[in-house]
Amino acid sequence: MAGRVGNLRRPSRYWPFTNPTTPMTTVHDPERKRALVLRLKRIEGQLRGIQRLIESGEDCEKVAQQMAAARKALDKSFYTLVGCVIAQGDVPADDVADMLAKFA
């Protein structure tokens, strides 16, 4: 199935890797997948808490502190995902490096 990014058409199987001959991988290990999903659910809870802080008129410094914590947690999730890709060995190192350069 094809998709669009801006004005560019891209095959969804190959995104985000630049080499169109390398299919995108998924997290195969059920334990790693579960841990990643649980981490993202915790981040989702953090974001909902930040929304409540803003709605209740909390101090901007407190909101900023919580935003920074959520951002760091999301970054850690990204690097966990990249670690899974590397550990599985499904994607060539150059493509992993391209993904890191593009999204990190």
Image (cartoon, grey):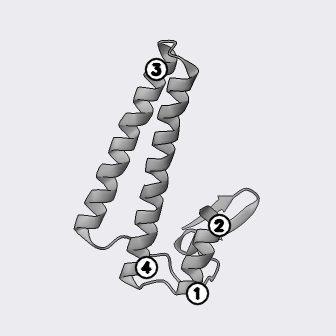
* Type of amino acid under label 3: Leu
Give the percent coordinates (x, y) of residue 42. Answer: 33, 42
Total marks shown come to 4
> Regarding mark 4 in the picture, which secondary structure is present there?
helix
Q: Earlier in the sequence, mark 2 or mark 4?
A: 4
> From the viewer's perspective, is residue 61 above or below residue 25?
above
Q: Is residue 45 left or right of residue 64?
A: left
Is residue 44 or residue 61 the one in the foreground?
A: 61
> Label 3, label 2: how many angstroms apart (C-alpha)?
32 Å
Q: Which mark is residue 102?
A: 2
Q: Nearer the viewer, mark 2 or mark 1?
A: 2
What residue did someone put label 1 on?
21
Q: Earlier in the sequence, mark 4 or mark 1?
A: 1
Q: Find residue 35 and report its image quarter.
A: bottom left
Q: Is residue 33 left or right of residue 90?
A: left
What residue did someone put label 3 on?
53
Q: Quadrant of the N terminus?
A: bottom right
Q: Nearer the viewer, mark 4 or mark 1?
A: 4
Residue 16 appears anywhere in the view: no
Structural crowding at the residue carrying mark 2, measured as other residues with C-alpha within 10 Å and reported as few (<14), some (14–19) or many (≥20): few
> From the viewer's perspective, is residue 46 above or below residue 71?
above
* Type of amino acid under label 1: Thr
> Label 2, label 4: how many angstroms apart (C-alpha)?
16 Å
> Label 3, label 4: how many angstroms apart (C-alpha)?
38 Å
